[in-house]
């Protein structure tokens, strides 16, 4: 039986709060509440002043609940809830959100102005939704916001255009997102039924400022062709994941002479190798994953053995 329930966490209604905490997990030390019962139907949420994190997991929520004004909320997680659509006003009552996580839902896009009121947003996770058109997300952040992390992994991205751009972020996650080609000026997505031969409908321009801002990039699992110009533009990045992609013939030279990468994942990448001994360690490397190269026959030299995964 589905529980039709209005979540109310008002400090002077102690008995109501206690009732709610019998359905959801309240943790005052962590200033969080987690609701994860599939039979729980959440319609309206009003929060106690101490609550800074809300986790709604495995609920039936094709549309988000109505939140009452709560300036203390810093993190909102709605995951595996079947979320399909948000209105432009869904987050207005939560002006101080720093972390917004809608991963593992059915979102195809976001309203253009949904995030414009979030002046403190640092992390935006939209991984494993149904987003196909990046042009609809280009101008979605509040003015002058630079995210710490943007995750679009696992989305079937197929459309973009020359007027589109990535929301600015220091960390960008695009694993398994239909990427086809990356150089220092653009990212091209794989052909699809809605955009096949014409590259102009699946190209996303990338500026030097955008690449220069990135300290972490994950494009794993795309069967992506990475151009040497992209590597040169990413020489400053600390963490790069190129696993299951195609790397240029100049990769080793770039790693030895230009890269400042600290954590590098090359597992199952396609690249030109001179022999079965990996001796290119870079100047700043702390961890290197070369598992799956040359059918697992790749051997790390003693110079790299301390941090080499194979």
Image: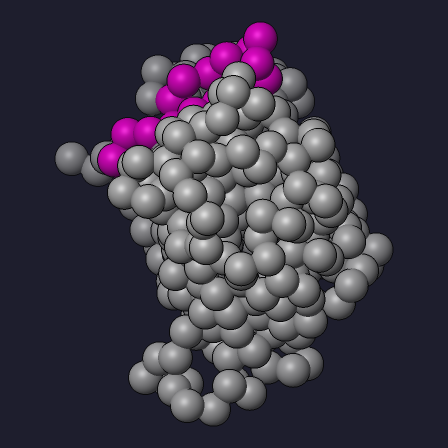
Residue at 66%, 41% in the rendered image: 256
Task: Tell me if residue 109 can be seen.
Answer: no
Residue furthest out toward the top? 29
Q: Image height check: is 162 above or below 296?
A: below
- For the residue pair 299 and 86, the one nearer the viewer reads as 299
The answer to whether 107 appears left or right of 205 in the picture is left
* Residue 141 placement (x, y as % from top left): 71, 58
Which segment did they paint magenta?
A: 24-38
Residue at 53%, 60% in the rendered image: 249
User: What is the tally of numbered marks visible in this picture?
Assistant: 0
- Is residue 28 found inside the magenta-colored segment of the image? yes
- For the residue pair 12 and 198, the one nearer the viewer reads as 198
Residue furthest out toward the right? 144
Q: Quadrant of residue 111?
A: bottom right
Residue at 46%, 16% in the rendered image: 26
* Residue 299 placement (x, y as % from top left): 40, 30
The answer to whether 288 appears left or right of 167 in the picture is left
Residue furthest out toward the bottom? 198
Residue furthest out toward the left? 1
Quarter occupied by the N terminus: top left
* Residue 278 placement (x, y as % from top left): 48, 35
- Is residue 220 found inside the magenta-colored segment of the image? no
Q: Image height check: is 191 above or below 260?
A: below
Quarter occupied by the C terminus: top left
Residue at 72%, 44% in the rendered image: 257
Task: Tell me if residue 299 can be seen.
Answer: yes
Q: Image height check: is 223 above or below 50?
A: below
* Residue 293 placement (x, y as % from top left): 36, 43
């Amino acid at each position: 039986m589905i529980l039709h329930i209005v979540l109310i966490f008002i400090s002077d209604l102690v008995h109501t709060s206690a009732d709610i905490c019998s359905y959801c997990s309240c943790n005052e030390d962590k200033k969080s509440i987690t609701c994860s019962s599939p039979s729980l139907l959440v319609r309206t949420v009003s929060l106690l002043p101490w609550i800074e994190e809300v986790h709604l997991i495995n609920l039936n929520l094709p549309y988000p609940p109505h939140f009452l004004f709560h300036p203390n909320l810093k993190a909102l997680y709605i995951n595996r809830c079947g979320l399909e659509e948000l209105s432009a006003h869904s987050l207005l009552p939560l002006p101080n959100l720093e972390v917004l996580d809608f991963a593992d839902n059915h979102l195809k896009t976001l309203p253009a102005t949904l995030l414009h009121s979030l002046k403190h947003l640092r992390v935006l996770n939209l991984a494993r939704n149904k987003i196909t058109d990046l042009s609809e997300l280009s101008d979605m952040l509040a003015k002058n916001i630079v995210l710490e992390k943007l995750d679009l992994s696992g989305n079937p991205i197929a459309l973009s255009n020359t007027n589109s751009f990535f929301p600015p972020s220091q960390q960008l996650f695009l694993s398994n997102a239909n990427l086809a080609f990356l150089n220092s000026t653009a990212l091209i997505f794989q052909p699809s039924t809605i955009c096949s031969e014409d590259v102009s409908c699946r190209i996303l321009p990338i500026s030097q400022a955008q690449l220069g801002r990135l300290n972490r990039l994950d494009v794993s699992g795309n069967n992506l062709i990475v151009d040497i110009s992209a590597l040169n533009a990413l020489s400053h990045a600390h963490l790069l994941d190129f696993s299951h992609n195609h790397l240029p013939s100049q990769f080793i030279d770039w790693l030895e002479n230009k890269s400042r990468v600290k954590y590098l994942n090359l597992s199952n990448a396609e690249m030109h190798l001179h022999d079965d001994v990996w001796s290119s360690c870079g100047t700043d490397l702390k961890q290197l994953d070369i598992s799956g190269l040359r059918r697992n026959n790749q051997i790390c030299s003693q110079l790299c053995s301390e941090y080499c995964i194979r």
